[in-house]
Amino acid sequence: MRIIADENMALVHHFFGHLGQLECVSGRHLHPEQVRDADILLVRSVTTVNKALLDQSRVRFVGSATIGADHLDMQWLNEQGITVSTAPGCNARSVVDYVLTALIHLANQYQFDLTQRVLGIVGLGNVGYLLAKTAQQMGLRVLGCDPLVTRTDIEQLPLNELLEQADIVSLHTPLTKTGTYPTYHLLNAQNLQNLKKQSILINTGRGAAIDNRALLDFLTHRPNYLQAVVLDVWEHEPLPNADLMPLTTIATPHIAGYSLEGKWQGTAFIYQALCQFLQREPQYRLADFLPPNRQLQSIQETGQLWPDLHQVLAQVYPIVNDDTALRQTLGLIDSERALAFDQLRKHYWQRRDLTAYDASHTLYSSKLQTMLVAMGLKTA
Ligand SMILES: NC(=O)c1ccc[n+]([C@@H]2O[C@H](COP(=O)([O-])OP(=O)(O)OC[C@H]3O[C@@H](n4cnc5c(N)ncnc54)[C@H](O)[C@@H]3O)[C@@H](O)[C@H]2O)c1
Ligand SMILES: O=C(O)[C@H](O)[C@H](O)COP(=O)(O)O
């Protein structure tokens, strides 16, 4: 059995090596000839899997170690009887850590009390709902917008009302171009105007959920209207708009879900699905590979919650380093800049989920401890 896998899939040899002849390739540049004699295809979000790629191949199982599925032509794959598995929720915790770390970074930078801000979440699925519950536990008021699900414990509003009322708008929808509620350019030249003055806009869903050109125009013509813009995902990756990036406050190369747990769970998820498809007993579980939890260190507390929390989180995820690395690519010519975007993703550092940290032996004030527990940290 021949298995073709994206070379950037974490632990791919560990999990899949025993199932067949495994060949790792560049997912971004995968050609039909490379998959012609393959039985199994394992991808990440950068490979478009459709008729053009698989028409001549004998692939009968496609696994994508991702939450998002907009790179898979599900209708065509279903029509061909090809089994498809994605990894729902695999890196939801990682994305929530990213959003909260970004917000705590901004609360420290602009000296505001995050718990006094209203968080508006667009898309209440695995990521959005986990973010909502975590933020509520931290003391924020949460509004949600999701025409496809009802969450009884979250106040849900139509999109325009949410944009008008929320101090922070965070996008967590899939990218869809069809259906009753398409998300392509969900935020656009018309409704960006509805965002509240001095609000914060965050996108960790898919780049094209925001019309990036419209956002660029909006930020250019109303320079101080928003307090901050945080973009992890961009239209036309791997080449983000070079004029838009300088107008953002935090800019990262689509790595919100790139914690070690997020990536490894994605692989483990499709390994289980493939074993089931092949009717083989799985030989490995994620727990066989996960490194031990880490211990958080004490800090010199100032007594001010947000600067103190920011100090603690700097041990887990110094988000500003990811931002700096991406901004450094701005001087490059386009072809090199696109390569650099992918290289930053390929060689991403080993970030752990906050839930992999233990503070049971660390002396923090109870205010700080309460916030960290709400964010999933282990304590005694
Ligand atoms: N930046 C990253 O690294 C990263 C990591 C993980 C996921 N993602 C992206 O985030 C998306 C969301 O992840 P998830 O696990 O929560 O997915 P999910 O499928 O569990 O939830 C998506 C939610 O969006 C809702 N939705 C769909 N159309 C909508 C619309 N027009 N308006 C409002 N809500 C709408 C759905 O009803 C669903 O509840 C993924 O599809 C993926 O594209 C990005
Ligand atoms: O959809 C997802 O799970 C995320 O966007 C994921 O982190 C994308 O990473 P990639 O597959 O591009 O490596």
Image: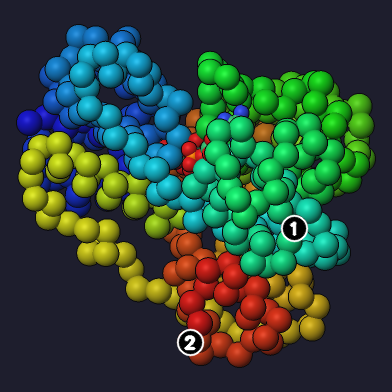
Give percent across and percent down for residue 41: 23, 29
Q: Which residue is drawn at 67% across and 86% down?
A: 366
Q: Earlier in the sequence, mark 2 or mark 1?
A: 1
Residue type at mark 1?
Arg
Q: Which secondary structure, mark 1?
A: strand
Q: Residues within 10 Å of mark 1 (few under 14, many from 20)?
A: some
- Number of numbered discs on residues: 2
Q: Residue at x 44, y 69 (%)?
A: 356
Task: Kindly report which numbered mark, 2 or 1, lies closer to the viewer in this rendering.
Answer: 1
Q: Which secondary structure, mark 2?
A: loop
Instruction: Find disc 1 in the rendering and name its residue.
Output: 141
Q: Residue at x 37, y 34 (%)?
A: 44
Instruction: Find disc 2 in the rendering and name its residue.
Output: 380
Q: Residue 305 carries which label?
A: none
Residues 60 and 26: in front is 60
Q: Residues within 10 Å of mark 2 (few under 14, many from 20)?
A: few
Answer with left or right where residue 35 lies relative to residue 37.
right
Answer with left or right where residue 187 lies relative to residue 286.
right
Q: Distance between the residues labelled 2 and 1?
A: 28 Å
Q: Which residue is drawn at 15% across and 36% down?
A: 277
Residue 134 visible in the shown view: yes
Give percent across and percent down for residue 128: 58, 47
Give percent across and percent down for residue 371: 65, 73
- Image height of 221 relative to 127, above or below: above
* Quadrant containing the N terminus in the rendered view: top left
